[in-house]
Amino acid sequence: MDLEAVLNHRRSVRVYDKTKKIDTLKVKHGLELATLAPNSSNMQLWEFYHITEPETLANLAKACLGQTAVSTAAEAVVFVTRQDLYKKRSKFVLEFEKGNIQRNSPIERQEKRIKDRELYYGKIMPLLYTRFFGIVGLFRVLLTKVIGIFRPITRQVSENDMRVVVHKSCALAAQTFMIAMANEGYDTCPLEGFDSKLVKRLLKLPRGAEINMVISVGIRKEGSGIWGERCRVPFEEVYKNL
């Protein structure tokens, strides 16, 4: 399928045909493609939990309030944000960027570019993603207000703002995954209706992890997999050409 056909094929499927099997390796490859999604500062503060075992899937369905979108699914993926890994990920990206610059930048520009990355990933990113009962976020907000008097600056830097940033990046990966699955002829359904405490317990997640969304995977059941025609607000109502 071309991209337009893929996007038209993708629907939020509520009931899957349990007699039709899917290839687990294709789902895994879809998650590999999901890592190519754009994300804020390339911090990649996400994890993907691929649920394939029937017992785990059944427990996940209970945590998702018994929805048929999970209970009839062949597999599922839980997209998880990991803001608590910001130090590890920023260090990883910094080390990659140093090598990247050495391999691909003109020699005369390498030193400055490496220093820029060291500042960005060694100091700015850790400052932005640190959380401490809202206090560090308040400091960032006050700092940007002062700097903003003299020049444009990103102002959404509170601890809640940064939490939103991490979830937006993870959602981009989730959308990329759903498109990849549609390209394979597989169906998906993104869910936000779940007991996050139960899901975290099921996956044995640490306190700093958060559930972004649960996406079930399978092949739609004809006649009941999707609920009729797709509804969208008229394009003219949402499109603004300035």
Image (cartoon, rainbow, N blue to C red):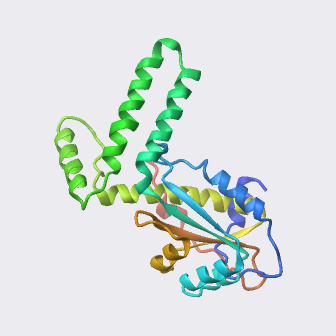
Q: Is residue 23 left or right of residue 229?
A: right
Identify the residue at image location x=67%, y=76%. 13
Q: Is residue 73 left or right of residue 176?
A: right
Q: Quadrant of the N terminus?
A: bottom right
Identify the residue at image location x=22%, y=50%. 141
Q: Is residue 114 left or right of residue 134?
A: right
Task: Answer whether residue 148 is visible to the viewer in this image.
Answer: yes
Above or below 48: residue 242: above
Q: Measured from the top left, where is residue 224 in percent x and y?
A: 72, 85
Identify the residue at image location x=73%, y=80%. 16
In the rendered image, the residue lying farthest to the top is 108
For the residue pair 164 and 54, the one nearer the viewer reads as 54
Image quarter of residue 11: bottom right
For the residue pair 177 and 4, the one nearer the viewer reads as 177
Q: Measured from the top left, where is residue 112 in percent x and y?
A: 40, 20
For the residue pair 171 and 3, the one nearer the viewer reads as 171
